[in-house]
Amino acid sequence: MNGTRPEVEAMVLVACTPFLKSTERAALLSAAPNHRDLLRLTTRDVEVIIGRALYRARWRPELALPSIERSTAWFGRPENGVLWIGDRDYPVMLRETYDPPPVLFVRGDPEREWRRSIAIVGTRKPTDHALDAAFALGFDAGLQSKPVVSGLALGIDAASHRGVVRAGGPCVAVLGNGIDSVYPGKHRDLAGEILDLNGLLVSEYPPGAGTHRYHFPARNRIITGLAPLLCVIQAPERSGALISVDYALEQGRDVWVHTAGTSDGSESAGTRALVAQGAPTFASLVDLGFFDQPVARRKKRLTDPRMALFGTIASNRAEPRRSLVAAARAKIDKWGQTT
């Protein structure tokens, strides 16, 4: 593999800068892979490296020093680690997406065949039928030892994780907070069971990072990026699960809606709209035909009107990149070809 792997302290420091985009963090770590170099940079230096003005944001790397100190103890445990986007163990499918996080903090064993996994999302306040459907889907996947990726949130996420755990299978919980904590706190035991069964906790936020509302929509792109298939169990009209659908379409993933999400009632308004715009439905893992055929990347499975409904496609979201950020993206692509 080409390129220099940044030191862990540098990765923690850059992960503590919420005003930087993923490609900008990668550019910064490529230009200054040592945390001491990062501490010496001025705001103007950072602007030159990332190719844009920071305006109201200021580069104050010294504020990340407590996080670095806290991380030192956290990394002392054998089950804890960090993945740089150029690492061989970094999930290939996630690296190939438009906006991959350059750094992933992990608890558990990251060596997993991600191309055979499914992502499951849905509302935090599901009906009993949808809750049972999420558990059953996770259980069936667990029996086949196929990883299930979800967000450890209340409702559908937790039910799918519990199904996998009950079957003794592996699953991945993508956190929207610092990797050293579990939110909501009532799911700490569930997170422990996931790890006991060789599962994985993943976050782009370092130890000590708090929980913020904007973390969770950003977290969804990792959930969908880790799997070739997204299953939406149930979602109301204004659900974070629909943000996941937007990301999945942008990433070229297949999107399916469970029949539990087609029932009457406001709890299913979002998933009914998905079906009305062309999303295929399923009732069980067998209906997906997912584990009985080779996995292929299929772009924009759903119809163009549906694309317009659920958000802008990657080509419309793309922003002009300046030289160093473009170079960072080229490095990411090159790393993907050498792993």
Image (tube, rainbow, N blue to C red):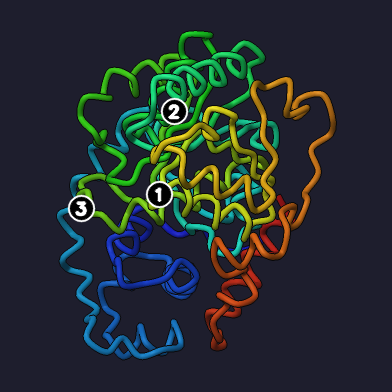
x, y (%) of residue 17? 29, 67
Circle 2 crowding by C-alpha within 10 Å: few under 14, some 14–19, many from 20: some
The residue carrying mark 2 is: 108
66 or 37: which is nearer to us?
66
Q: Which residue is mark 3?
A: 67
The disc labelled 2 sits on which kind of residue?
A: Gly
- Label 1 neighbour load within 10 Å: few <14, some 14-19, many 20+: some
Please tell me whether mark 2 sits on a helix, a strand or a loop: strand
Dot label at residue 71: none
Task: List the residue tagged with mark 1.
Answer: 240
Q: Earlier in the sequence, mark 1 or mark 2?
A: 2
In percent of the image, x 46 and y 29: which residue is there? 200
Q: Find numbered disc 3 in the image and state the secondary structure of the residue it sits on.
A: helix
Residue 117's quadrant in the figure? top right
Instruction: From the image, state whether disc 1 or disc 3 is nearer to you.
Output: 1
Please state which of residues 152 and 324 is positioned toward the viewer in this rendering. 152
The reply to whether callout 3 and callout 2 are in contact (CB within 8 Å) is no
* Quadrant of the rendering where the N terminus is positioned: bottom right
Going from the N terminus, do you reach mark 1 or mark 3 first? 3
Q: Residue furthest front?
A: 264
Tell me which amino acid carries mark 1. Gly
Q: Position of residue 97 (x, y in %)?
A: 62, 58
Q: Amino acid at mark 3?
A: Ser
Real-space Cα separation, disc 3 to disc 2, in angstroms: 21 Å
Of 152 and 338, the residue lying toward us:
152
Left or right of 329 in this view: 166: left
Question: What residue is drawn where x is 60% and y is 44%?
Answer: 91
Q: Residue at x 45, y 59 (%)?
A: 6
Q: Is residue 55 left or right of residue 50?
A: left
In the image, residue 32 lies at what x, y percent? 41, 72
Q: Do labels 1 and 3 touch, CB within 8 Å?
A: no
The residue nearer to you, when weighing 18 against 151, is 151
